[in-house]
Each structure stands twice: as structure tokens, then as C-alpha cells.
Amino acid sequence: MSTLNQIVELVRIENTPKAEYLDLCQSKLSRMYPHHELHGEHCSLQEFVACPPEAVFNYLAQTESLLEWTYSLRNLTPTEKPGLVMFGDKIGGATKCYCRTESDSAAMTVDYHCAWDQSDELWMIYYMRVIDAHPVLNQAGSIVTWTNCCHPYYKENPFPELAAPDRSVWVGDGWSFFYAGHQMELTNLKRILEYRKAEGISLTDLSHLK
């Protein structure tokens, strides 16, 4: 059974309407990210998680984890293509978001290859790495880094004919909010995993999502 409703201050579409979420992002922009970098070609951020790096990696490597710690990816459905799943991205209304997860346990990297509307070209790539905090901070835990690059398709939808009916937004319209929005999602990740560790709940058992 999910314990998400017992974790305070998670920012998810179920408890934070889209308008409120965008206001939260806006409130953080000027303090968190210089303007020239915010609208640049990449968005990189990091978070400390007081949990073992192997467990953090194993959690992230399960595509189902995105149902918990992201703001708006919900309703995972397998597709006919091996390894490819489809989410509903609630921030885009009835938008379909396709995703394939590629991970490397030795390097503890997890890359989410995604795209709105179609699965032939997964151009939205989210590069994540889990780092053992002990060698770099001399303390137990993990550093999670997350990098996203501004692919040209963010600026203009290459497949407008595939957009969900009546959708007025494109994923790239929110590029200026990516740092703030992703930081809130990383904070969700931190709170979920640290709560489970403190309560003695498995960090990597996601059977309640399957």
C-alpha cells in the first residue's frame, strides 16, 4: 500500500493544482537560477538523500517510481514495444508521455528517454546519476544529480498533428520553469525515500504500483 498520503509537503498534482504549482515555480525562479542560465541550453540540479546509494539507484531504475516522485506522470501502461511504457502527463491534460528507462548499475546512472504524443523519437532525455555521498561529503547517503538539455523540439512541437485535443500548452512552454519544477520533484524523491527509511519500509519494493 502506498504511504504517500502520510508524507508531508510532497508536491504532486493530486494535492497541488497546476496553477498553484506554476505559482510555486515562479516564486523560486529569481532566487534559484540566474536568468541567462535558466533560459540556456541545459538544466542541471542535485539533491542529497539520506539513504544508501544502491537503494536510491534501484528505486529510480524502476520506471514505476516516476508515478510517485514526479509531479504529473500517472497511469503507467505497457506498450507493445519491449521496455517502452506510456504515462498520462496530467500537466498536459490528456497528453500521452512515452518513456524508456536505461540504467547502469555499475555507474549508478538512470536515463529516462521520453517524448510527448509519440514513441518513435524519444527526444526528452532526463539524465540522472546517484553518487555515494561518503567519498565526497564524508557522510552516509546519496547525491542525486539530474540534467536535462534543451533539445530544439522544446522550442517548437515537431508533431503538432499528434497533440491531444484542445491542448493549449507544449512541454517546451515550461522550459523556464524546469529548474524550479524539477527541484520540487527531487525534493519529493528525497522525502519519499527518507520517510520509508525512517519507518523501516522497503525503499525499492514498488509492488503497490504494479
Image (cartoon, rainbow, N blue to C red):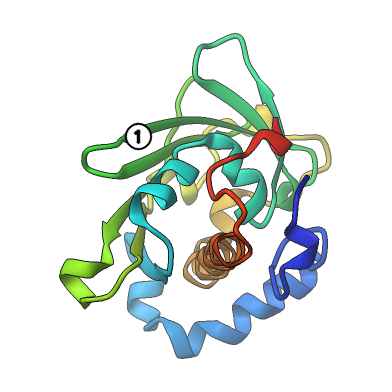
* Image coords of residue 207 (percent x, y): 67, 34
The one nearer the camera, 40 or 128, is: 128
Residue ID at (54%, 11%):
81
Residue ID at (38%, 40%):
111
In this figure, which residue is indicated by the disc labeled 1? 103
The local crowd at label 1, few if under 14, some if 14 to 19, many if 20 or more residues have their Cα within 10 Å, is: many
Quadrant position of the N terminus in the picture: top right
In the displayed structure, 136 sits above or below 90; it is below
* Image coords of residue 209 (percent x, y): 70, 36
In the displayed structure, 84 sits above or below 39; it is above
Q: Secondary structure at mark 1?
A: strand
The one nearer the camera, 157 or 139, is: 139
Name the residue at the front extreme: 200
Left or right relative to 208: residue 184? left
Left or right relative to 159: residue 128? left
Residue ID at (69%, 68%):
10
Residue ID at (43%, 52%):
56
In the displayed structure, 146 sits above or below 160; it is below
